[in-house]
Amino acid sequence: MAKSTKKKHWIKSEWSMAIIGALFSLIFTIIYDYFKSNPFLSTIGKFFKFIYHSIIGFLTFDIKVWWILCFFIVLIIAICLINVFQKNDTTIKEELPKFIEYKEDWIKGYDFKWNWYKNNGQWTLGHITVKCPKCQTPMNPNYAQYYRCPRCNHEPENQIMMNDIRSIIIDNSNRMVES
Ligand SMILES: [Zn+2]
């Protein structure tokens, strides 16, 4: 790791860049002269000449200051837009609490399902449903909060108390937030 950073530093230094540049142009001149002196390779020589002039032309290209300004303005706008979109993404994620996917659980021998909804900025436990284990008909608690299947009259052996189930679900969701 230390070796590679040392190497990078060496390549980056000004004098090494100057030597590399000089060597590069020297090699190019040798190649260019060689091909120029050999008539059989004059086509390849022209090709190298073209590449050489293209590189020189690119490196010595006249750049207007306003082009650079435009480039930086576009770059800054692009960075700002990316930041805004990323911020929007994270705020959407932050709004959803950990327990939002907790919508089903096996409690007291029954498979309960429910939903969450937002009420005055607070996530609230919505409607809880439980199906009859024998015929899968939704069981509704009667006025005394006792569950009974309307189809097969199945009744839980240990009666389910709606408030207990609500308390367990809310406690489980709070534990998810705390963890
Ligand atoms: Zn039933």
Image (cartoon, rainbow, N blue to C red):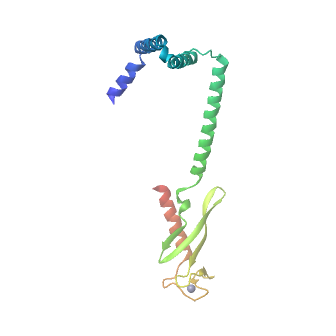
| Coordinates of residue 73 in the picture (x, y in percent) | 65, 26
Give the position of the N terminus as an image quadrant: top left
Quadrant of ligand 1: it is: bottom right
Q: Residue furthest bottom?
A: 153
Q: Is residue 145 left or right of residue 31?
A: right
Tell me which residue sits at (51%, 84%) in the image. Answer: 156
In depth, the one of 49 and 115 nearer the eye is 49
On screen, 68 above or below 139? above
**Does 111 sit above or below residue 170?**
below
Tally the numbered discs. 0
Q: Is residue 22 above or below residue 162?
A: above
Q: Position of residue 107 (x, y in %)?
A: 48, 73
- Residue that extends furthest to the front in the rendered view of this protein: 40
Q: State left or right for residue 101 relative to residue 20.
A: right
What residue is at 48 percent from the left and 73 percent from the top?
A: 106
Which residue corresponds to the image point at 59% horizontal and 52% vertical from the top-left?
A: 95
Which of these two is toward me, 43 or 18?
A: 43
Give how far across and how far down residue 102 sits, in percent. Answer: 53, 63
* 2 vs 47, nearest the viewer: 47
Quarter of the image with the C terminus is: bottom left
Rendered position, 3 above or below 36:
below
Percent across and percent down for residue 6 are 35, 23
x 56%, y 81%: residue? 136
